[in-house]
Amino acid sequence: MQTFFQYNWMVREQWYEWCESISEEELLGTRTGGVGSILKTLFHIVDVEWSWIQVLQGKPDFQEDFEHYKSLQQVRELDAKFRPDVEPFVLSWHAGLEQNMFEDHLADGRIVTDTWGEVMRHVIAHEIHHVGQLSVWAREIGKEPVSANLIGKGLR
Amino acid sequence: MQTFFQYNWMVREQWYEWCESISEEELLGTRTGGVGSILKTLFHIVDVEWSWIQVLQGKPDFQEDFEHYKSLQQVRELDAKFRPDVEPFVLSWHAGLEQNMFEDHLADGRIVTDTWGEVMRHVIAHEIHHVGQLSVWAREIGKEPVSANLIGKGLR
């Protein structure tokens, strides 16, 4: 589990660096699919990862509003602010937590349960999926996307 | 590890079903980014998964040519043909295989090593990444993409 989080954090950092050479107009430009812009995708990834790790631990979650994070600098700062909440939980993850139950109270009143293992993998897949969207939008603005390779990153 | 493969196989099947309502022209139409079309992406996912699992086991790999798989039916058949090579290896995966070494002889003559654990995670991330690209292209043709959610699929 840790390996995939490390992978996502490395790739995310590389996307931040990639964003440095892109104008704010392009970063905020409306795109087809996903959550609709490059920067909003990175914000969404950070927000969703943190929110799930918070709720698993029974800690408060709140919906961050992208309106307050519409620059690369602000998204990076939010990520840096959230990381100390996320990283220790991830690094201390072990198989004994897999089957812990999380009760999700949905907006429509239903209650569904997910195991903690499902939630952790959901968070991992969530980021990789959205980064795939970034790779298309990168090509749309004529830029080479960050590599999605997991091999070759020393993640062993 | 198994959970992520199960997830990918479920989502892949849902994309095949999604493709049934899309014209062949749209499935083969040139798209920006990735490997360039919806159907070629599904073909590529199938091919790459099989190739990695083959080479880990020291079994022959060969480059499939998309020219021979330019219909949904043909890609599904290739997937069905490959699955019996892939599934037993995935289902019998255990932590003791994590640090096995794979020697990759690159085209430029260099030899790099990856652990089997790295390769397996690379295959998983590879598919999720490309499916993220499909989700953008789906919206481009005005269709709702398959959900990328890992929770709610009974993967516990």
Image (cartoon, coloured by chain):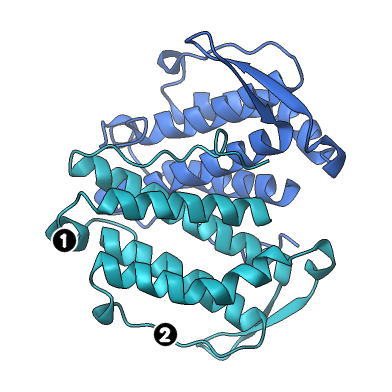
Chain colours: A cyan, B blue
Q: Tag 1, which chain?
A: A
Q: In this view, does B141 lie to the left or right of A15?
A: left
Residue that label 1 marks: A24
Q: At x 37% / y 30%, what residue is drawn?
A: B35
Residue A142 occupies which quadrant of the picture?
Answer: top left
Q: Which of A15 and B37 is in front in this view?
A: A15
Question: Of circles 1 and 2, which is in front?
Answer: 1
Indicate the quadrant containing the C terminus of chain A: top left, top right, bottom left or bottom right. Answer: top right
Residue A102 occupies which quadrant of the picture?
Answer: bottom right
Q: At x 50% / y 87%, what residue is drawn?
A: A107
Q: Inspect this view and state whether residue B146 appears.
A: no
In the rendered structure, find residue B23 and report the number of the disc placed on it.
none
Residue A111 occupies which quadrant of the picture?
Answer: bottom right
Which amino acid type is shown beneath numbered disc 1? Answer: Glu
Q: How far apart are marks 1 and 2 (CA)?
A: 23 Å
Q: Nearer the viewer, residue B141 or A7?
A: A7
Measured as percent of width and height from the top left, residue A136 is found at: 30, 44
Which amino acid type is shown beneath numbered disc 2? Answer: Gln
Residue that label 2 marks: A63
Q: Is residue B79 left or right of residue A69?
A: right
Measured as percent of width and height from the top left, residue B12 is found at: 55, 43
Measured as percent of width and height from the top left, residue A15 is found at: 36, 51
Q: At x 39% / y 49%, what residue is drawn?
A: A14
Could you classify mark 2 by the number of other residues whose Cα lies within 10 Å: few (under 14), some (14-19), or many (20 or more)? few
Q: Inspect this view and state whether residue A53 appears.
A: yes
Secondary structure at numbered mark 1: helix
Q: Tag 2, which chain?
A: A
Secondary structure at numbered mark 2: loop
Q: Do labels 1 and 2 share a chain?
A: yes
Q: In this view, does A37 lie above or below A144?
A: below
Could you classify mark 1 by the number of other residues whose Cα lies within 10 Å: few (under 14), some (14-19), or many (20 or more)? some
